[in-house]
Amino acid sequence: MPELPEVETVVSGLRSRLEGRRVRDLVFLSAHLERKQPASALNPVIYRGKTVQKIWRRGKMIIFSFSGGCGLLIHLKMTGQLYLCPPEQPLDKHTHARMTFYGLGSELRFRDVRKFGFYNCLRLPEIMSRVEAELGPEPLELDFPEFQHLLQKHGGKKIKGWLLDQKIIAGIGNIYSDEILFRSGIRPDRPAGRLSLVETRKLYRAMKSVLNKAIELRGSSISDYVDSAGEKGQFQQKHLVYDREGQPCRRCRQAIIERKKIAGRSSFFCPYCQK
Ligand SMILES: [Zn+2]
């Protein structure tokens, strides 16, 4: 599933191409997308002639604001892709929406093979209230005292589950939680509220450095992830534990990476480097 760095990469690519553009048309290509719209959803026809004002990321969600107070709330979930391509590129059955613009030789497509993602046409205030109700703070904006406070507040949770809980902190998923914990030297099943001050500092620093480095390398391409231009990311080459079960640890070179189900998700860790 695309996580914060992948979604940030998609958003920054779209922002430079689409902000300030006027929408020619928005068309749903599958009944599935219509069925998934909330009851308060706007008719896609309303978007004709509206200008894209801003595109940004919140957690793993993508938000568009348009003139006239319309918005779009998009979640890529497992296999969603949001990218620009030439209009003549053939459509397949997994492409669920296309948005065209005046004066732009590309169109914006939403493609989702497994259909867990959503693409909701809503008024912006409704998007903002939904997002703020569902998501905790952004990890890259969080200061250290706030981070410590959140660890104590949800201290009974295992640290892996704490990192994954979007209501506590937004944007981190299975890949980056494992990579952050490995680089912090903390086992994923430790209770969040029982980390020492030194461990808390390591975790805080690793969280920021892993996410920033992954954004710099344009995300991790594990399965379907591509950026807004349809290109793969490079951070998968920097993975130290994720999906490396049974292979020797890249740091200590003696222990074997283990896999254990923690907080309902497969977690990869080194039993020697992580305490
Ligand atoms: Zn190790």
Image: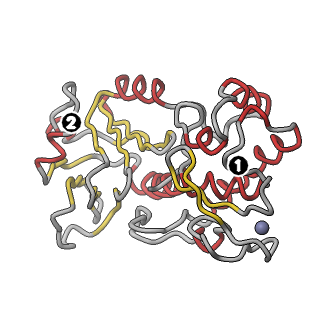
The residue that appears at 42% across and 66% down in the rendered structure is 226
Q: Which residue is mark 1?
A: 207
Q: How is the image coloured?
A: secondary structure
Relative to 179, residue 118 above or below: above
Residue 263 picture quarter: top right
Few, some or many residues within 10 Å of mark 2 (<14, 14–19, 20+): some
The residue that appears at 17% across and 68% down in the rendered structure is 92
What is the C-alpha distance between the residues marked 2 and 1?
A: 34 Å
The CB of the residue at mark 2 lies under 8 Å from ligand 1: no
Quadrant of the picture in which ligand 1 is shown: bottom right
Q: Is residue 111 visible?
A: no
The type of residue carrying mark 2 is Gln
Residue 45 picture quarter: top left
The type of residue carrying mark 1 is Met
Q: Secondary structure at mark 2?
A: loop
Q: Residue furthest right?
A: 198
Q: Is residue 5 visible?
A: yes
Relative to 12, residue 232 above or below: below
Q: Residue furthest left?
A: 31
Q: Which residue is mark 2?
A: 37
Label located before the other in sequence (2 or 1): 2
Residue 80, position as x, y percentages in the image: 34, 56
Residue 67, position as x, y percentages in the image: 32, 33
* Horizontal side of residue 101 vs 233, given as left or right: left
Residue 150, position as x, y percentages in the image: 69, 28
The residue that appears at 58% across and 56% down in the rendered structure is 260
